[in-house]
Amino acid sequence: MKNIGKFLFLILFFGVVGVASAGDFRDGMRAFSKGDFATALGFLERGCEGTEVAKSCALLGIMHNEGKGVKEDAVRASGLFEKSCAAGESWSCVMLGGMYADGRGVSKNAKKAAEFYQKGCDGEFALGCVFAGQIYFEGRGVQKDVGRAEAVYKRACEMGEKLGCEALKAVATKR
Protein backbone atom coordinates (compact mmCIF):
# COMPACT_ATOMS: atom_id res chain seq x y z
CA MET A 1 0.00 0.00 0.00
CA LYS A 2 3.01 2.31 0.51
CA ASN A 3 3.91 2.18 -3.20
CA ILE A 4 0.45 3.23 -4.27
CA GLY A 5 1.27 6.58 -2.68
CA LYS A 6 3.80 7.25 -5.45
CA PHE A 7 1.15 6.52 -8.07
CA LEU A 8 -1.34 8.74 -6.31
CA PHE A 9 1.24 11.52 -5.96
CA LEU A 10 1.59 11.55 -9.74
CA ILE A 11 -2.17 11.78 -10.15
CA LEU A 12 -2.33 14.62 -7.66
CA PHE A 13 0.71 16.38 -9.17
CA PHE A 14 -0.39 16.23 -12.79
CA GLY A 15 -3.93 17.12 -11.83
CA VAL A 16 -2.64 20.36 -10.33
CA VAL A 17 0.28 21.40 -12.53
CA GLY A 18 -0.77 24.38 -14.58
CA VAL A 19 -3.63 25.33 -12.28
CA ALA A 20 -3.56 29.07 -11.85
CA SER A 21 -4.68 29.14 -8.22
CA ALA A 22 -2.31 30.41 -5.57
CA GLY A 23 -2.02 28.71 -2.23
CA ASP A 24 -0.24 26.60 0.26
CA PHE A 25 -1.05 23.35 -1.49
CA ARG A 26 0.44 24.49 -4.80
CA ASP A 27 3.58 25.77 -3.09
CA GLY A 28 3.81 22.61 -0.99
CA MET A 29 3.41 20.44 -4.08
CA ARG A 30 6.19 22.30 -5.87
CA ALA A 31 8.55 21.88 -2.92
CA PHE A 32 7.59 18.22 -2.56
CA SER A 33 8.23 17.52 -6.25
CA LYS A 34 11.72 19.04 -5.88
CA GLY A 35 12.45 16.87 -2.84
CA ASP A 36 12.39 19.89 -0.50
CA PHE A 37 10.26 18.12 2.08
CA ALA A 38 10.93 20.57 4.93
CA THR A 39 9.51 23.45 2.91
CA ALA A 40 6.65 21.31 1.63
CA LEU A 41 5.77 20.31 5.18
CA GLY A 42 5.23 23.92 6.29
CA PHE A 43 3.01 24.82 3.33
CA LEU A 44 1.01 21.60 3.50
CA GLU A 45 0.43 21.80 7.24
CA ARG A 46 -0.92 25.33 6.78
CA GLY A 47 -3.10 24.21 3.87
CA CYS A 48 -4.38 21.19 5.78
CA GLU A 49 -5.48 23.44 8.65
CA GLY A 50 -6.76 26.17 6.35
CA THR A 51 -8.78 26.28 3.16
CA GLU A 52 -6.99 23.57 1.15
CA VAL A 53 -7.78 20.66 3.43
CA ALA A 54 -8.51 17.89 0.90
CA LYS A 55 -5.34 18.06 -1.18
CA SER A 56 -2.95 19.39 1.47
CA CYS A 57 -3.91 16.73 4.02
CA ALA A 58 -3.68 14.06 1.31
CA LEU A 59 -0.10 14.95 0.41
CA LEU A 60 0.82 15.27 4.09
CA GLY A 61 -0.61 11.77 4.51
CA ILE A 62 1.76 10.48 1.84
CA MET A 63 4.69 12.21 3.53
CA HIS A 64 3.88 10.59 6.88
CA ASN A 65 3.00 7.22 5.36
CA GLU A 66 6.28 7.01 3.43
CA GLY A 67 8.57 8.96 5.76
CA LYS A 68 9.23 11.77 3.27
CA GLY A 69 10.88 14.56 5.26
CA VAL A 70 9.24 13.35 8.46
CA LYS A 71 9.47 10.25 10.59
CA GLU A 72 7.30 7.52 9.07
CA ASP A 73 4.07 7.55 11.07
CA ALA A 74 1.19 5.42 9.83
CA VAL A 75 -1.11 6.59 12.64
CA ARG A 76 -0.63 10.25 11.64
CA ALA A 77 -0.98 9.30 7.95
CA SER A 78 -4.28 7.54 8.57
CA GLY A 79 -5.64 10.59 10.39
CA LEU A 80 -4.59 12.86 7.54
CA PHE A 81 -6.13 10.57 4.92
CA GLU A 82 -9.34 10.47 6.96
CA LYS A 83 -9.47 14.28 7.14
CA SER A 84 -8.75 14.54 3.40
CA CYS A 85 -11.36 11.90 2.59
CA ALA A 86 -13.97 13.74 4.67
CA ALA A 87 -13.12 16.89 2.70
CA GLY A 88 -13.82 15.08 -0.59
CA GLU A 89 -10.47 13.75 -1.83
CA SER A 90 -11.54 10.33 -3.13
CA TRP A 91 -8.13 8.74 -3.43
CA SER A 92 -7.46 9.55 0.24
CA CYS A 93 -10.51 7.42 1.02
CA VAL A 94 -8.91 4.57 -0.94
CA MET A 95 -5.58 5.03 0.86
CA LEU A 96 -7.41 4.91 4.19
CA GLY A 97 -9.28 1.81 3.05
CA GLY A 98 -5.94 0.15 2.31
CA MET A 99 -4.68 1.06 5.74
CA TYR A 100 -7.73 -0.59 7.32
CA ALA A 101 -7.30 -3.63 5.08
CA ASP A 102 -3.65 -3.99 6.15
CA GLY A 103 -4.01 -2.83 9.75
CA ARG A 104 -1.43 -0.10 9.12
CA GLY A 105 -1.83 2.86 11.50
CA VAL A 106 -5.34 1.69 12.40
CA SER A 107 -6.82 -1.55 13.68
CA LYS A 108 -7.29 -4.04 10.88
CA ASN A 109 -10.94 -3.86 9.88
CA ALA A 110 -12.17 -5.26 6.55
CA LYS A 111 -15.61 -3.71 6.97
CA LYS A 112 -14.12 -0.22 7.33
CA ALA A 113 -11.78 -0.96 4.42
CA ALA A 114 -14.81 -1.77 2.26
CA GLU A 115 -16.58 1.42 3.40
CA PHE A 116 -13.63 3.64 2.51
CA TYR A 117 -12.95 1.85 -0.78
CA GLN A 118 -16.62 2.33 -1.66
CA LYS A 119 -16.45 6.00 -0.69
CA GLY A 120 -13.49 6.40 -3.06
CA CYS A 121 -15.43 4.60 -5.77
CA ASP A 122 -18.46 6.83 -5.17
CA GLY A 123 -16.12 9.79 -5.60
CA GLU A 124 -15.12 8.53 -9.06
CA PHE A 125 -11.72 7.08 -8.13
CA ALA A 126 -11.74 3.86 -10.14
CA LEU A 127 -9.23 1.91 -8.05
CA GLY A 128 -11.59 2.33 -5.11
CA CYS A 129 -14.16 0.42 -7.12
CA VAL A 130 -11.67 -2.34 -7.90
CA PHE A 131 -10.64 -2.74 -4.26
CA ALA A 132 -14.26 -2.59 -3.05
CA GLY A 133 -15.15 -5.22 -5.63
CA GLN A 134 -12.48 -7.56 -4.31
CA ILE A 135 -13.85 -7.29 -0.79
CA TYR A 136 -17.46 -7.82 -1.92
CA PHE A 137 -16.47 -10.72 -4.16
CA GLU A 138 -14.50 -12.47 -1.42
CA GLY A 139 -16.81 -11.52 1.45
CA ARG A 140 -13.97 -10.12 3.61
CA GLY A 141 -15.58 -8.27 6.51
CA VAL A 142 -18.82 -7.90 4.59
CA GLN A 143 -21.38 -10.33 3.33
CA LYS A 144 -20.22 -11.88 0.08
CA ASP A 145 -22.08 -10.18 -2.75
CA VAL A 146 -21.00 -11.15 -6.25
CA GLY A 147 -23.64 -8.90 -7.82
CA ARG A 148 -22.33 -5.87 -5.97
CA ALA A 149 -18.75 -6.81 -6.85
CA GLU A 150 -19.76 -7.04 -10.49
CA ALA A 151 -21.44 -3.62 -10.33
CA VAL A 152 -18.40 -1.83 -8.89
CA TYR A 153 -16.03 -3.63 -11.26
CA LYS A 154 -18.24 -2.47 -14.13
CA ARG A 155 -18.13 1.07 -12.82
CA ALA A 156 -14.32 0.94 -12.63
CA CYS A 157 -14.20 -0.40 -16.16
CA GLU A 158 -16.49 2.38 -17.38
CA MET A 159 -14.09 4.88 -15.79
CA GLY A 160 -11.31 3.36 -17.89
CA GLU A 161 -9.61 1.26 -15.22
CA LYS A 162 -8.18 -1.84 -16.92
CA LEU A 163 -8.12 -3.80 -13.64
CA GLY A 164 -11.86 -3.23 -13.30
CA CYS A 165 -12.47 -4.58 -16.80
CA GLU A 166 -10.31 -7.65 -16.11
CA ALA A 167 -12.07 -8.31 -12.80
CA LEU A 168 -15.46 -7.92 -14.47
CA LYS A 169 -14.53 -10.57 -17.06
CA ALA A 170 -13.26 -12.89 -14.33
CA VAL A 171 -16.50 -12.58 -12.35
CA ALA A 172 -18.55 -13.28 -15.49
CA THR A 173 -16.63 -16.52 -16.13
CA LYS A 174 -17.29 -17.71 -12.56
CA ARG A 175 -21.06 -17.31 -12.83
Image (cartoon, helix red, strand yellow):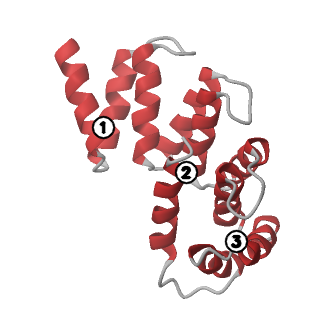
Sequence-first tag of 1 and 2: 2
- The residues tagged by marks 1 and 2 sit, at their Cα atoms, a distance apart of 17 Å
Amino acid type at image mark 1: Gly
Amino acid type at image mark 2: Ser
- The residues tagged by marks 1 and 3 sit, at their Cα atoms, a distance apart of 34 Å
Q: Is residue 39 above or below residue 169?
A: below
Residue under numbered circle 1: 164
- Are the two marked residues, 3 and 2, in contact with CB atoms closer than 8 angstroms? no
Q: Nearer the viewer, residue 139 or 62?
A: 62
Sequence-first tag of 1 and 3: 3
Residue under numbered circle 3: 37
Residue 106 at x, y percent in the picture: 74, 32
Q: Nearer the viewer, residue 127 or 7?
A: 7
Residue visible at 42% across and 37% down in the picture: 129
Residue visible at 81% across and 72% down in the picture: 46
Secondary structure beneath dot 1 equals helix
Q: Is residue 173 left or right of residue 109?
A: left
Residue under numbered circle 2: 90
Amino acid type at image mark 3: Phe
Residue visible at 44% across and 20% down in the picture: 136
* Front label number (1 vs 3): 3
